[in-house]
Image: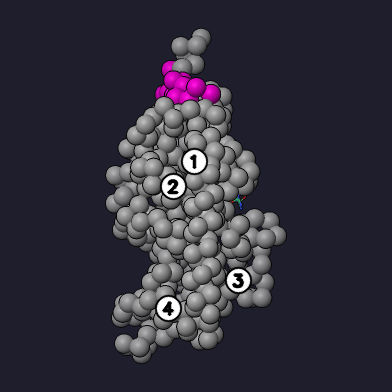
Amino acid sequence: MERIQKYLAQKLRLFDSSEKVLREPSITGIIDYIKENENCKIITMAGAGISTSAGIPDFRSPSSGLYHNLAKYNLPHPQAIFELDFFMENPEPFFMLAKELLPEGFKPTPSHYFIRLLWEKGLLLRHYTQNIDTLERMAGLPPEKLVEAHGTFHTGRCLKCRAPYTLPWMKEKIIEGVIPKCEECNEGVVKPDIVLFGEMLPERFHYLTDRDFAQADLLIIMGSSLVVQPFASLVDRVRSDCPRLLINKEKVGMQDRLSRFLGLRQGLIFDERSGRDVAWIGACDAGCQLLADELGWGDELKDLIKKEHERLDAENTKKN
Ligand code: OAD
């Protein structure tokens, strides 16, 4: 009976493998796994939840999420503000919102510095983020370790002649409350290089996901609802013996049995039998601090945050 179960489980991919890759499917199991794999190649995947403690709202949380607070923009539907077709017709709501959300005065969170620490410890294969707030860059993660899947506010481009623009140039216009217009062709609107719905993800995303995911020894997903594609499906791109840890306020990323049966999407499987997926439910910062503590880097993480926040505060004081 057990053999039939095992055969069906593997054949129908109901569970990825009955071989347990973690001693126990818990945060302790993940910590032991990292300690035992000296050269563990870790991929981190993040969403808006790693930046909420910096004061930036996420998108879908009830009441505090951005999509629940857009009434004043009179949109046909909340997501329209991030759709290319709507932006081409009416860029004003996007820039009004950008003025509120500009990466200005926000500081990276403990989660961002934890990712930096993974890099400093030589454990970070790559960090994939859906966030456009540039906090990973601000936290000191080197550009080659970073994939900004939904683009970034860091640079911009004219939609007509493609002339490039910098964040300080765009920021000035956005703060003034004017729609940034291209100074080269005098016609096009300058759009920050963020990926709107209806646009392709950056070439770098496709190139690196093809290379990275098959090599990863551990996937850590933080602060995302895992609903936006193709990002959400990256969780299926790691090997079937690669443990996956979700750190989030809620369980996400599970697929229904039919999707799995049809081989459409596997998703995360928080089931004792899967033996490799772990959900740690709580705030990202607390989850990251817990991991750092258990790995023996707890104080180092706290010191890094303190030092970097002081540096950013001093820089801001100088600017103002
Ligand atoms: P969502 O708002 O969809 O999801 C954020 C997730 O993080 C939710 O599951 C929250 O419960 C969780 N969360 C919030 N704060 C948290 C905290 N402090 N600690 C732990 N968990 C927390 O945001 P994303 O998944 O990033 O795309 O959204 C994906 C994409 O949808 C965005 O990149 C954006 C949006 O439309 C584009 O604009 C193209």
Q: How is the image coloured?
A: one colour
CA separation in Å, label 1 and label 2 = 9 Å
- The residue at which mark 1 appears reads as 297
Q: Which residue is mark 3?
A: 76
Name the residue located 40 percent from the left edge and 55 percent from the top edge. Answer: 141
Q: Quadrant of residue 293?
A: top right
Rendered position, 122 above or below 278: below
Secondary structure, mark 3, is loop
Residue at the outermost bottom position:
186
- Please report the residue visible at 52 percent of the width from the left and 73 percent of the height from the top: 316
Q: Is mark 2 within 8 Å of ligand 1?
A: no
Distance of label 3 from label 2 (alpha carbons): 43 Å
Q: Which residues are magenta?
A: 7-24
Query: Picture coordinates of residue 112 (x, y %)?
Result: 49, 53
Q: Which callout, 4 or 1, points at the residue further toward the start of the chain?
A: 4
Gap between marks 4 and 2 measured at Cα: 29 Å
Q: Nearer the viewer, mark 4 or mark 1?
A: 1
What is the spatial separation of the Cα atoms under label 3 and label 4, in whole angstroms?
31 Å
Residue at the limit of the structure toward the top, as seen here: 1
Is label 4 in a helix, a strand or a loop? helix
* Magenta stretch, overall SS: loop
Query: Label 1 sits on what residue type?
Result: Trp
* Residue under the point 42% across and 78% down: 168
